[in-house]
Image (cartoon, rainbow, N blue to C red):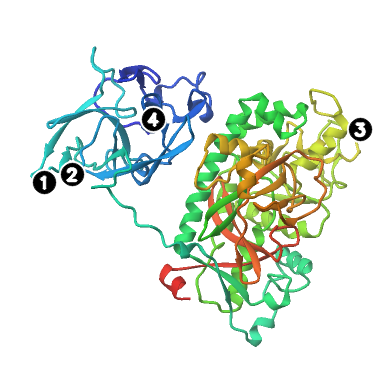
Amino acid sequence: MPHKIELAVTPFGTELGTAPGGVISYSSDYDSADPNIYPNRSAYRSYYDGIYMGYKWQCVEFARRWLYINQGYIFNDVSMAYEIFNLRSVREVATNELLPLQAYKNGAQRHPEVGSLLIWEEGGEFVNTGHVAIITQVSDDYVRIVEQNMDFVVWPEGRDYSREIKVKIGRENDFWIECSFSDATILGWMIQTDDTSHGEILEPEQQELFNLKPATAHSSPQALKPWLNIANDDEAAYVDMMQGHWLTSVAEDHLNYYLLSQTAQEALESATDELHGLFMHATEYVLQHDELVESFGLPASILPRIRQSWDNRLNQLITSRFDFSMSDKGLKVYEYNCDSASCYMETGKVQGKWAKHLGLKHGEDAGSTLFAELVKAWRESEVEGLVHVLQDTDPEEDYHALFMLSAIEAAGHKCERVVGLSSLSWNEQGDIVDVNGNKVKWVWKTWAWETALDQLRTEQDAQQTISDKIRPPGSVPNLSDVLLRKEIMVFEPLWTLIPSNKAILPILWSLFPNHPLLLNTSFELSPELEASGYVVKPIVGRCGANIQLIDKNNKVLADKGGAFADRTQIYQQLFALPKVGKYYVQVCTFTAAGNYAGSGVRVDSSMIIGKDSDCMALRIDDDLSFLDT
């Protein structure tokens, strides 16, 4: 949000002044932004030389743009300006190399320099966000700075800085910059240098806190008793699928679970929120570049609909899932599943009931908030009227559908479950209706969007456009009829085809190279990937199908067949799942409306997680207890 001032302001986008290097500072008075020029959030993204700088015209955007133009490097994306103070590197754009960045607290003996980043703490004048400016002149009496989103006033004629701030030097040559606001605090300044003298040293995290730990609950006669309430439809369907009251299909694992440290949990929450933003950024970038869209293997006829879906329904995501490898070697994301219904009930309901049934007191349920967050997301959705929950006839999808149906109903919406499509039909008016004659308008589905696209590919052949089909009254619609009909709002929206497609991974790496949460990924097998080992993945696939893991010696570590061998492949840096106990363990985090909502794990004796991989309980332990376990 813009900062309040008393002076007259200028409209959004007005040039306020020009900083050294010819870098323009713009007014960020969002209240005056023209909705015709800025119709949606994506219109506010700022690029320079094709490189993302930030949101127009915030302080972080200006700082990154100034550094790029004048110094040739930029810092990684941050959620809030004050977070810059914890960065310890910048990326030189020309070479893609990381350069050291040091932080100096206000009062440090290392004085700021021209080009230093000046950082304000969150709070007061800069509530929630903090603030960043660039220092362009330094003296013993003042520093001069340039910035954006501080005020919206044009700089005086002939002046190449926004503000001059008083300075005082102490007896120990300590350098102090006055904060102009009584309710704000200057954290300090950042300098690109490898000299750490007088700088702030970040305490290294205890990497062992990122290792999952296997654990076992105490056995008792109680453990063998039924514990899921089959009077609840979703729990009954789950028991039928599992052939008993089990969380895992392996008998000797019925008492086993995994522990996660509080530090690791906090890292997962932060990573989930940050990665959602990165994937949304990459989605926007793809849809702005036709040559990139071609890499996704989508029918040309569907592309206008995807763009329309993105423009109209950007914030209508109910839920999604990230798949991670987490260990003392680091935290890395494999992919983003924005179009999958799996593992939600296991994480959001079953693992918690399992622990309660066993009287387990060790740790806290990592999925305890998921159901409530899903309910909240549905309440905040734009749904008006009956929601049809569509699922395939696969028995496994019964409990997926019923679990989400319970969340939708808890949010206050009426629901109708539709198993298969045979109970739907076309009416005389050309609408799709259910068995009771209710018009289908709002849909949540377990089917993948790709299933509908496969039907479209068969029917459309070489057609370049798609129009709403109307079939004879009384006939049964196919999946593409339902999901691609303009009058029907589907969750998750059609645009989720982009972030769910693995073709986005190389693009994400190109936009945010060397990002600590990402893996090097390419459309081509590069020498760098061969040297590190790599994973071959089809851009569209499910349940680990057609994935190969190949090490740096060209040895195949794991190979899984499937039905997606004919799809375009991408190559991702090998970063194998950790083996914890007898299983390879993948951590999954779930979102609701784009924010972290819960965690779970999937395990397998293979290095590739697939359809038959089990879910097991995940519990969060405080750090001290975790290290003592």
Asked if marks 3 and 4 touch (Cβ < 8 Å), the reply is no
- Name of the residue lying farthest toward the left: 171
Near mark 4 (Cα within 10 A), the count class, few <14, some 14-19 or many ≥20, is: many
- Where disc 4 sits, the SS reads loop
Residue linked to disc 1: 172
Q: Is residue 443 above or below residue 266?
A: above
Task: Say what amino acid the circle numbered 3 marks.
Answer: Pro
**The N terminus lies in quadrant:** top left
Q: Is residue 202 in sight in this rendering?
A: yes
Residue linked to disc 2: 109
Residue linked to disc 4: 58
Task: Say what amino acid the circle numbered 4 marks.
Answer: Gln
Mark closest to the chain's N terminus, 4 or 2 = 4
Asked if marks 2 and 1 touch (Cβ < 8 Å), the reply is yes
Asked if marks 4 and 2 touch (Cβ < 8 Å), the reply is no
Q: Position of residue 315 (x, y in %)?
A: 57, 38
Q: Residue at x 73, y 51 (%)?
A: 548
Task: Tell which of 442 and 295 is nearer to you.
Answer: 295
Q: Left or right: where does residue 338 sit relative to residue 455? A: left
Residue linked to disc 3: 472
Q: Residue at x 88, y 47 (%)?
A: 422
